[in-house]
Image (spheres, grey):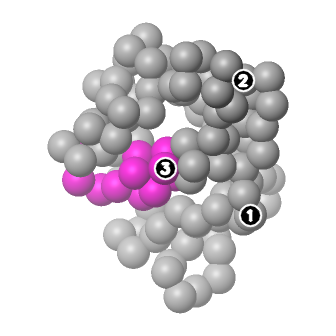
Amino acid sequence: MQALDYDGLMQANLTGVFSERDPERRLIAIGELYAANATLNEPETSVIGHASISNAVTAVLASLPADFVFSAMGPALGHHGIGRLRWQAGPPDGPSAVTGMDIAHFQDGRIHSLYVFIEPGT
């Protein structure tokens, strides 16, 4: 069995899905990274399926200033099909305004479920 590239997959999710403001490009990335019946679990909602995940990300991005980007706070770590990535969001050349962590459950090399945690106070 080939080892999962937790860092590569989770970094691709952060940039290609959560930082992608173009819905068509985002949906392509979701199709490459997520299982067809994947679940996105955010603090306020849970959705299932590619289109619903893309719509949820659209809502997140709409709530943030247009220049905000997500960036990793170090490499993703993982084992036994579970990965985690700490991230921050803010202006590209400014301080982070929001920090959090994604926990992903992988099956067959794709994200089966993603849990998004927002750090308190951000």
The N terminus: image quadrant: top right
- Residue 30 visible (yes or no): yes
Distance from the alpha carbon under mark 1 to that under mark 2: 19 Å
**Residue type marked 3:** Ala
Estimate the x, y position of residue 89 in percent, counting from the top left: 58, 65
Estimate the x, y position of residue 114 in percent, counting from the top left: 60, 29
| Residue with the mark numbered 3 | 12
Estimate the x, y position of residue 35 in percent, counting from the top left: 44, 18
**Dot 1 crowding, Cα within 10 Å, few <14, some 14–19, many 20+:** few
- Residue 45 visible (yes or no): no
Of the pair 98 and 25, the residue shown nearer to us: 25
Determine whether 76 is above or below 102 in the image: below
**Residue type marked 1:** Gly
Residue at image point 43% right, 11% down? 37
Determine whether 50 is above or below 30 in the image: above
Of the pair 40 and 75, the residue shown nearer to us: 75
Q: Earlier in the sequence, mark 2 or mark 3?
A: 3
Residue at image point 65% right, 82% down? 95
Q: Which numbered tag is attached to residue 43? A: none
Is 52 on the left-hand or right-hand side of 39? left
Residue at image point 34% right, 55% down? 20
| Residue with the mark numbered 2 | 81
Q: Which numbered tag is attached to residue 74? A: 1
Is 37 on the left-hand or right-hand side of 122? left
**Residue type marked 2:** Gly
Q: Is residue 14 magenta?
A: yes
The C terminus: image quadrant: bottom right
Q: Which residues are magenta?
A: 12-23
Q: Is residue 73 magenta?
A: no
**Dot 2 crowding, Cα within 10 Å, few <14, some 14–19, many 20+:** some
Q: Secondary structure at mark 2?
A: loop
